[in-house]
Image (cartoon, coloured by chain):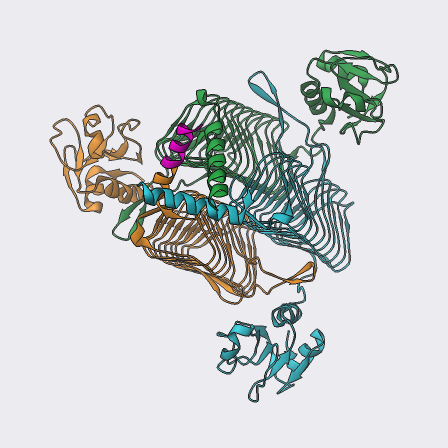
Chain colours: A cyan, B green, C orange
Amino acid sequence: MKRTAEEIAGFIGSEIVGDRGVILESVASLQNAGPKDLTYAEEKFLSDVNASRAGCVIVRGGEWPNRTVIISANPKLAFARAAKWLLDEPVDDVGIHPSATVAPDARIGEGVKIGAAAVIESGVVIGKSTVIEAGCYIGKKTTIGDDCVLYPRVVIYKDVTIGNRAIIHAGAVIGADGFGFVRDGKSHVKFPQAGKVVIEDDVEIGANTCIDRGSLETTIVRRGAKLDNLIQIAHNVDVGEHTVIAAQTGISGSSVVGANCLVGGQVGIGEHARIDDNAIIGGQAGVLNGKRVRARDGILWGTPVRPLKQFLLEQAHLAKLVKEKP
Amino acid sequence: MKRTAEEIAGFIGSEIVGDRGVILESVASLQNAGPKDLTYAEEKFLSDVNASRAGCVIVRGGEWPNRTVIISANPKLAFARAAKWLLDEPVDDVGIHPSATVAPDARIGEGVKIGAAAVIESGVVIGKSTVIEAGCYIGKKTTIGDDCVLYPRVVIYKDVTIGNRAIIHAGAVIGADGFGFVRDGKSHVKFPQAGKVVIEDDVEIGANTCIDRGSLETTIVRRGAKLDNLIQIAHNVDVGEHTVIAAQTGISGSSVVGANCLVGGQVGIGEHARIDDNAIIGGQAGVLNGKRVRARDGILWGTPVRPLKQFLLEQAHLAKLVKEKP
Amino acid sequence: MKRTAEEIAGFIGSEIVGDRGVILESVASLQNAGPKDLTYAEEKFLSDVNASRAGCVIVRGGEWPNRTVIISANPKLAFARAAKWLLDEPVDDVGIHPSATVAPDARIGEGVKIGAAAVIESGVVIGKSTVIEAGCYIGKKTTIGDDCVLYPRVVIYKDVTIGNRAIIHAGAVIGADGFGFVRDGKSHVKFPQAGKVVIEDDVEIGANTCIDRGSLETTIVRRGAKLDNLIQIAHNVDVGEHTVIAAQTGISGSSVVGANCLVGGQVGIGEHARIDDNAIIGGQAGVLNGKRVRARDGILWGTPVRPLKQFLLEQAHLAKLVKEKP
């Protein structure tokens, strides 16, 4: 879309100074932006604003006689909001592609796109303005809300419920069987994986991430949670509201991660663990089976997970030991 | 399917007490079960049996005058077996979907389903009653046995052999090139990845798991092994019978994992390592290249892997050092 | 293809001794090779050459009166080159499969194969002799060079540039949104992921590996780099020329990995880190956010990453402490 700087300032409810009519078409970094780009400057980069070729810069304040600027108390947040609006492209190919396979009893909302070679099974319900890109597979009786985007080749198994405004990246698999077996001598009998998956509103799920269905319970990813790529969420896991989890982290069966947590990449969380709301867990940390992780301990690190300060002290002691007697 | 409690008791060869005619349609946990659900109770939850609304509960013993119970020495195992039988649904769309692409010389067994947009290349052989879901790709000359289930978007490269009753979840990739190069100055020449993959009977493979083909040998996953999601199995690896591997574990080239092992999640096993039969390796552990891991050492942990007891003592010592001289 | 031993010796520019006319059809290991196989022997296995049934063996030297051998200063490298040539199969189904969906304005080079159910969006450019296997998805305005192979179900988002001779394995996802959010109270506003991805010539990308697009910059994987399976490359990352990265490693946003590095499996690299050219990082190591990793320190290991020698000394000290006071 094209927007004037004034329209953007209006959208984010901020004051504009300079050429209100400058036309913006895209976004870029302060360094790379050109005359048709919107950008923003964090405090530490304010000295670069005058050198930027950006059409418009969102800043916290200051005097910029030769620039068009939008004033915002939180330039990065304002930029993120404005960028979303500016970059929003209408879906140009709403409707069901002739090569898609859609069950006759599936209920497809208004303004939905179903891409080429996509498969929508019987009993599926898809809300309005949702985009199901090429090659996606939606299993029986799964429900998907309004305004979602499923990028190509997403697989949703049967009996999954997805809320509104979910974004699911390519190759993600939601609702595969959890990993549970009962030993019968040396061999393993599959424990039933007959539960469901619920993905609430405003969740984003990264590429090739896997979220297994519950065994006898429900696996749930709550409102506003953000999951990066290649994450493993096992059966019966409960991920709290607005929790952010970085790539390649794995959460084992029946664990509960609270709300507003930050979980780094490659973290491993054992079975039946419980992470408090607001916990911060550093990359590659490990939480043992059944452990309770408390947020009051600050940033947590290491395997088994411990306060970052303690982890660093331990590392320092170890290094010192080696120095003394190599 | 619908089954009476009596039919289920008969199927698992167990005694039934109570209303033999109660009709069961599904399974649930003791807490969530309703009148049409089968469930089970482990010893520690026996006190919850009377409060459960389940139509039928599998228990080890006891007196339950107001309940319909099935008596089994191993309620969880009996439940797993019964659930599999009760939940088994006949495939309702056997045959080749008109949007699938099947090579004229592929040999497709009786009762096979080939889903929408699936691709079956030349020389493929598929046994009877196997289900190939939508969007799967089966490469040239690959052989798949009877009664397998390949969930949507599984990719099997050429010259792979899969036994009977394999379950392969969505997005798994079997037979991609192993990762081998020969340095030629600064650049890398691809070492041939011309070997095969053999997946034996009763193997389950998780979503988005990757099993590479052998370079000059064969990558093999033996009978009854169970692999979780997002696992990496490199070229020439040999995974033993009935070994269970949790999510996000990686096994490097030419390593051998024995039979009946339990390997936790996010474990890393180097090249040319050898894990004894019956070994138990905890989550996030690391086995160095060329190492032999012995099962007699009990549960193993840490990187490099060592007996759990030693790992915990080391952690305790470290913590103490810090306490003494922070 | 079938080639005589003499043709192969000619191709790699090496001397041949023995039956120049022996016909070779495939490759195998020294142990498994038969009369139609080419193989090679490293120095330590020279004693096995006489027992091998191989049609032709590449060796460094020696007297082999009863064998056909090719003499090369680097038998493994010569074998890799010869194998590539010997095993090269012409693509037998060049052209666009009738079930593929190709935008009318896509520019498809000569000798290109577009497999079944593949989707090529508007504005795509594909160079000559490139193979796009079944079910691949190529997003708008993406450019792919000559002689590439995209295995089945690869997803390339829009605005990605891929050079010549790239090999991309099944399930890889290139160009998905990076993982960036701005906090707005408890919820998270998506930071724009509007950058590009550039994959240079001769890059190989493993199965189910994810390479995110830049946020405001470009994610780049430089010439000759080799990435194994299930790797995560975050937004704005720069992977240097001829760098080799093993499976399940993750590189966080805006980090730079130099040229000719060797990065083991399951390594985690934080944000804004910088790895020198020629660095060697062992499996499961962790590089903290913002760290500079210097190659002069030799092999690096552990979390936080440190010289291997120091890591081993620390482990030894720890073990000793436990022995003294268990």
How far across and down, in percent of the image, does residue A123 sit?
A: 77, 43
**Magenta span includes C323:** yes
Residue extending furthest front?
B324
Is A296 or C288 nearer to us in this picture?
A: A296
**Magenta span includes A184:** no
Question: In the image, is residue C317 above or below residue C136?
Answer: above
Q: Which residue shows up at 68% across the image and 67% down it? A: A90
Q: Is residue B291 visible?
A: yes
Would you identify the image quadrant in which residue C43 lies? top left
How far across and down, in percent of the image, does residue B251 sit?
A: 44, 35
Is A13 or C18 nearer to us in this picture?
A: A13
How far across and down, in percent of the image, does residue C197 sit?
A: 48, 61
Residue extending furthest right?
B66
Q: Left or right of C97: which side holds C261?
A: left
Is B108 or B45 nearer to us in this picture?
A: B45
Q: Which residue shows up at 58% across the image and 16% down it? A: A185
Q: Left or right of C35: which side holds C313?
A: right
* Quadrant of the image containing the C terminus of chain A: top left
* Quadrant of the image containing the N terminus of chain A: bottom right
Q: Can residue C134 be seen in this view?
A: no
Q: Main secondary structure of the magenta part?
A: helix
Q: What stretch is highlighted in magenta?
A: C316-326
